Image (cartoon, rainbow, N blue to C red):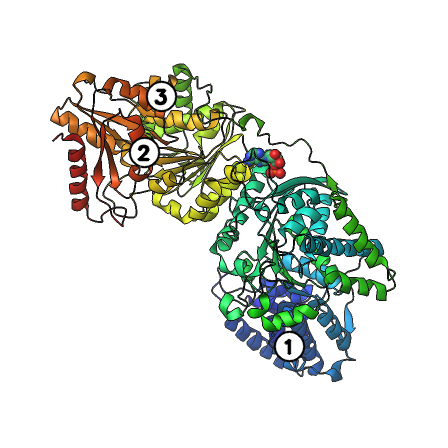
Amino acid sequence: MQDGVMQAWLESSHLAGGNMAYVEELFEVYLDDPTAVGDEWRTFFDQLPREGSGHDTKHSEIREQFRALAKNKLKQAGTVVAGAPDLKQVKVLQLINAYRFRGHQHANLDPLDLWKQETVPDLSLEHHDLSKDDYEQEFNVGSLAVGQETMKLGEIHQLLEQIYCGSIGAEYMHIVSTEEKRWIQQRLEGVRGRPEFNTDEQKNILKELVAADGLEKYLGSKFPGAKRFSLEGGDSLVPMLKALIRRAGEQGTKEAVIGMAHRGRLNVLVNVLGKKPQDLFDEFAGKHSTNKGSGDVKYHMGFSSDFATPGGDVHLALAFNPSHLEIVNPVVMGSVRARMDRLGDKEGAKVLPITIHGDSAIAGQGIVQETFNMSQTRAFQVGGSIRIVINNQVGFTTSKREDTRSTQYCTDIAKMVQAPIFHVNADDPEAVVFVTQLAIDYRNTFKRDVMIDLVCYRRHGHNEADEPSATQPVMYAKVKKHPVARKRYAKVLQDAGLVSEDTEESLVSNYRDLLDKGEIVVDEFREMKAHSSDWSDYIGNEWDVDYDAKISTTQLEQLGTEMSSYPEDHKLHSRVKKVYDERMKMAKGEKKADWGFAETLAYASLVDQGVHIRLTGQDSGRGTFFHRHAVLHNQNDASTYMPLNNIREGQGQIELYDSVLSEAAVVAFEYGYATAEPEALVMWEAQFGDFVNGAQVVIDQFLSSGEQKWGRLCGLTLLLPHGYEGQGPEHSSARLERFLQLSADHNWSVCIPTTPAQVFHMLRRQHLRPVRRPLIVMTPKSLLRHPLAVSELEDMSTGVFQNAIDEIDSLDAKKVKRVVFCSGKVYYDLLKERRERESKDVAIVRIEQLYPFPADEVSDILKAYKHVKDFVWCQEEPQNQGAWYSSQHHFRAAIPKGADLTYAGREASAAPAVGYLSEHNKQQQKLVDDALTIK
Ligand code: AMP
């Protein structure tokens, strides 16, 4: 610390009074929380050098300096150390600070009063050397935002209890930003723990609680024993969500996307989104429309509506989701991001994500962490989300904390992004609405995630047919006696003389009458207006529908040149420069196109047509195999340049991001994006194809069957490097067999293109064809640089994607004795070997799209080989993997009657590939031999 500063301070501060201990204590308070000390002190302490701030001074050294300087100064001045009052003042500040930090641990959060809260010593007066004897003494309240500078200790203590240990337990002191902490303090402390609502608002809350309870009771009596995953016990979720949407609408939100598991979902559908009760009753009665696909249970179904707020209508979309808990969160975020992009909303001011979690799931599922980790990144940020936990203190039959988690609260994971967490007792609906308003205001001010932990209970078992007392006897003995939220709140209002005794009963019977009529019960419900995303062009089209693929060679040359150009002063790495120099030659037709060129050219041609492209993935900017280089890094200053975004004025935008190192959350996010935006080509790329199994839930539960279960189209493309190059079990297979096993109902396309022209056509087809279904691509590794895997520009300006490709060498078809079918890289191994052998009697036919199987094209190709009786399927993968088991029925159906189909490939194996290169080479040679040798 500089002597000059210290000197000035010594002369001007309380230290002149001589209390070094006072300053030290105050400094400790400041270190815990800079907002806890007065402005003057903070300004001073802010000037001190800090550990980790780039200065090398340690806190202990600073204190040493305090002491030394103070001693000298005080000696000179001959002053006496000041007495107790100053020290007590610090203690009071420490007490305030302790409540801010740990008050939530004494808060009254559990409606059932079952939580065993430990006693927190810091929250006692004694811990701070204070006692009730000091109650009458006046102290400065520091930064306590209660609108007074000084107060008696008794009042301060009472206020702290009220603010921090009432129905709200606020955790926010882990936030580093002083501004955010101050903001939250102002809001919490400003109302002194007693949020005020006017009588109309209070009556409205009561009405909403009546609705929450009324629906469950009605369903319970009309459909006894049917599963509905009742909200009962967490009834205040309904006033909470409605308050949230209202306030968001007032602040400019235009769309909100909600993700929630099954608990309380039917209630939210009817009482918040305005689903017609009659439609729900019909679903309970088993009615459904016949023209839909496989369908889904009612508590997985999504819904869309508009909700009137003082700021205008807010469009609400409840996301469809399976029972796999928490996985819908990144889907919601992706859907929000797509809507933000469509509305030109960079910060999330117009679109709001709301995710509703279960207490066991939020602590148990890793996808929660992945989603939080994405929340502030370039590719995935959505301007913060509102996270609500329906914390009914039990997951199915498991409720002991020592069984469900290792954290204090189920919400602790939110601290990783410094989200404030508001625990709130669900039986205090005013506190619930208050924290909800606080949460949305915080999100909209700071564009960060915020968490509300709605501490409640579950009136029934996991579902209504379950007997919860068998496993939670004490809890359910209490639940049975516990009055419902609406009754409790009605009594509060009656006791305050705000409503008459019969108000509650008349609200209950009015609501029941509405349900009897089956009519919509939400006053704010509005019919959904024409929507900015229009899917009508894509509904009902088959995968092989025609599309306009035209593009001229001149256009390709021009686009090729644009996409290979960059500013002169943007200095490229020499290896990257070489790639770009080569691309320039390819654009001019001086060199055949390679994979990277053709893929990039497909993107260039699409953005030139105004298409929006989004590609995220692990190292996608450069490409795992140093082949894409869509983002150019200036070697002088590390700035970046994307030629694809500089094709022409007014072009479509390409967003290309290296993603966070996750699969599940990222693929789910992109699924959410692609299901909300039909007009963008959305792609995810795996670093190596096998990593896609980290996203298996998304593939099984959403991508493969979202259209069949929910009628939701999705054009997401997965680029999965695949191919047996001797790199061992973990980098060879993108698990083609899994995608083929899930292939049915023309749910998606599974392609293995083998030439640059094919990848060009395939990517363009995926977007230009009026079909929005997923595309799964096994992308190559060694083919990226294979001398034979090259194409002419004319191969791209003519034709379309070939689902199957006939023999390319000029063999005399009549002399062919064997036809080998194959897909992917092994084709080049077969071709090379056959050419070396100079054999003329084996034709090689490539299946470039394994699903939907191109029966017509294959049959056309086979017309020339009608006489052939010997057909072989050749694959690199072990026999139990790859396409053999899932696709052989298609191959068999395609070959002439009486012909034989045999297998040439690796033997069945538990692992995808061997770990030894020599063994790999041996196997590879054998499968090629097997395929080509006619015995
Ligand atoms: P949303 O904005 O998600 O509420 O969607 C509004 C409406 O657009 C829905 O009710 C559907 O009719 C339609 N829609 C939205 N997404 C899709 C999709 N992925 N596939 C088909 N139709 C969709």
Residue 11, percent from left and from top:
66, 71
Q: Nearer the viewer, residue 225 or 176?
A: 225
Q: Residue at x 53, y 45 (%)?
A: 331
Q: Quadrant of residue 7?
A: bottom right
Of the image marks 1 and 3, the number of the one nearer the N terminus:
1
Q: Residue at x 43, y 17 (%)?
A: 551
Q: Secondary structure at mark 2?
A: helix
Marks 1 and 2, how far apart at CA? 84 Å
Residue 537, percent from left and from top:
56, 25
Q: Which mark is residue 217?
A: none
Q: Quadrant of residue 841?
A: top left
Q: Establish if 219 lies above or below 483.
A: above
Of the image marks 1 and 2, the number of the one nearer the N terminus:
1
Q: Residue at label 3?
A: 587
Q: Secondary structure at mark 1?
A: helix
Q: Residue at x 63, y 47 (%)?
A: 284
Residue 156, percent from left and from top:
74, 73
Residue type indicated by callout 1: Tyr
Observer-side mark, 1 or 2, equals 2
Q: In what quadrant does ligand 1 lie?
A: top right
Label 3 crowd (10 A; few <14 / some 14-19 / many >=20)? many
Q: Residue at label 2?
A: 889
Q: Nearer the viewer, residue 421 or 477?
A: 477
Q: Residue at label 1?
A: 22
